[in-house]
Image (cartoon, rainbow, N blue to C red):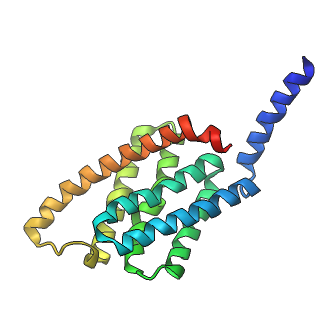
Amino acid sequence: MLNQNSSKHDSSSHDNALRSNAFTPKAISLCGIFLVFTLVFLFLAGSITNIQMVSYCLSSIFIIIVLEESNLRVGIAFYVASSLLALLVLPNKLAIVPYILFFGHYGLWYYWYTKTKKKYLVHIINYIVANIGIFTTYFTCKELFVTLKIPALILFVPIVEVFIFLFDHMYGRCLFYYRRDIRSKIS
């Protein structure tokens, strides 16, 4: 009986040790695999215009999995590595800008949002950061978007707000699905 309890305690302390120690072999291997997937989706976003937004959204999912399996330091390292590798490897540098300014770091903000107690305040900050990221992306690389005139720009704002709301909801659903169905299979 004592031996069973100590093995349960060892298992939970091992899980806590994995989360506290940033760069474990498991975290490094997950980052490597997810870096490849992120780069593939960013390549698709830069190559096939019909699936651009879907590719950007899918490229941003992997950082939340890295954060779930490790900690914030590994997540930040993953974001920096994926951004730098994309700039070094991918041919369409302009198509990487939305990932760097919005999609790539969204998981870091979302992770912070799920871990804090003041959800409303963090949700407002998350929304502000998302808006800054999208509008910075729009104004820095207008070639990625349809050239908008002033009346169309007025329509762009509510479309962006709806997109951020839907993207945030999709992000939460993906995290829920990962925790419920996938996490136990890769742990």
The vertical placement of 62 against 95, above or below, is above
Whether residue 82 is visible, yes or no, is: yes
The vertical placement of 22 against 178, above or below, is below
- Identify the residue at horizontal 59%, vertical 63% (top origin): 78
The vertical placement of 141 against 113, above or below, is below
Q: Where is residue 97 in the image (x, y as percent from the top left)?
A: 40, 73
Q: Position of residue 125 (x, y in %)?
A: 39, 50
- Identify the residue at horizontal 57%, vertical 60% (top origin): 34
Q: Which of 61 and 186 is in front in this view?
A: 186
Residue 158 occupies quadrant: bottom left
The vertical placement of 136 against 93, above or below, is above
Q: Which residue occupies the extreme left position in the image?
A: 151
Q: Position of residue 20 (x, y in %)?
A: 73, 48
Q: Which residue occupies the extreme top position in the image?
A: 1
Residue 41 occupies quadrant: bottom left
As drawn, is 181 to the left or to the right of 145? right
As drawn, is 80 to the left or to the right of 121? right
- Identify the residue at horizontal 10%, vertical 70% (top origin): 150
Task: For the N terminus, give its image quadrant.
Answer: top right
Task: For the C terminus, give its image quadrant.
Answer: top right
Q: Position of residue 120 (x, y in %)?
A: 39, 39
Whether residue 122 is visible, yes or no, is: no
